[in-house]
Image (cartoon, grey):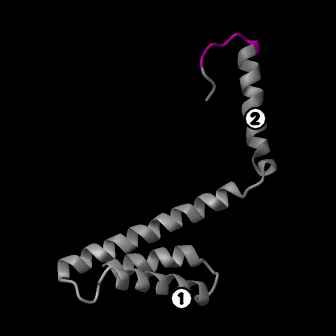
Amino acid sequence: MGELAESQVLDTIVNGSGQGMRECWRRRLESMRADLGYADSSALERLLIQQVTLCWLNLNLTEYRHTNIMKQSITDCWPLLGKAADYGSAAIYKGVREPCV
């Protein structure tokens, strides 16, 4: 089960970057498992180690997505910001005291 989840997260991270990137992530996960003693662990400990490495991978996916969002230029978002600013100005001008949504 954990291998399937790991594979899906890797597919999301790599997303067309090629198998080289996938292999780098996979080796990093193997290294982490080895450092945590995966090979000599009981079944329960292996499940826990697998969960820890999957959480680490999910954290990296979240940071990767956040970085891509933050790389967007403010000009890409300007049409939305402009509409919000216009609405806010109109609400203030009309004396509306409700918060703008």
How many residues crowd mark 1 within 10 Å: few (<14), some (14–19), many (20+)? few
Contact (CB < 8 A) between labels 2 and 1? no
For this orientation, the residue located farthest to the right is: 75
Residue 83 image label: 2
Q: Residue furthest top?
A: 95
Q: Which quadrant does the N terminus fall into?
A: bottom left
Q: Label 1's element?
A: helix
Q: Amino acid at mark 1?
A: Glu
Tell me residue 89's x, y (percent).
Answer: 76, 22
> What residue sits 29% from the left and 83% below the top?
37
Q: Which residues are magenta?
A: 93-98
Residue 63's mark?
none
Q: Main secondary structure of the magenta part?
A: loop
Residue at left 60%, top 58%? 66
* Residue 65 position (above or below residue 84): below
Q: Quadrant of the C terminus?
A: top right
Residue at (32% x, 71% y) in the render: 51
Q: Is residue 97 magenta?
A: yes
Q: Nearer the viewer, mark 2 or mark 1?
A: 1
Pick the residue in front: 82 or 64: 64
Element on which disc 2 rests: helix
Quarter of the image for residue 90 reads: top right
Disc 2 residue type (three-letter): Lys
How many C-alpha atoms fall within 10 Å of the one at disc 2: few (<14), some, or many (≥20)? few
**Magenta-drawn stretch contains 56:** no
Q: Residue at x 52, y 78 (%)?
A: 11
Mark number, residue 23: 1
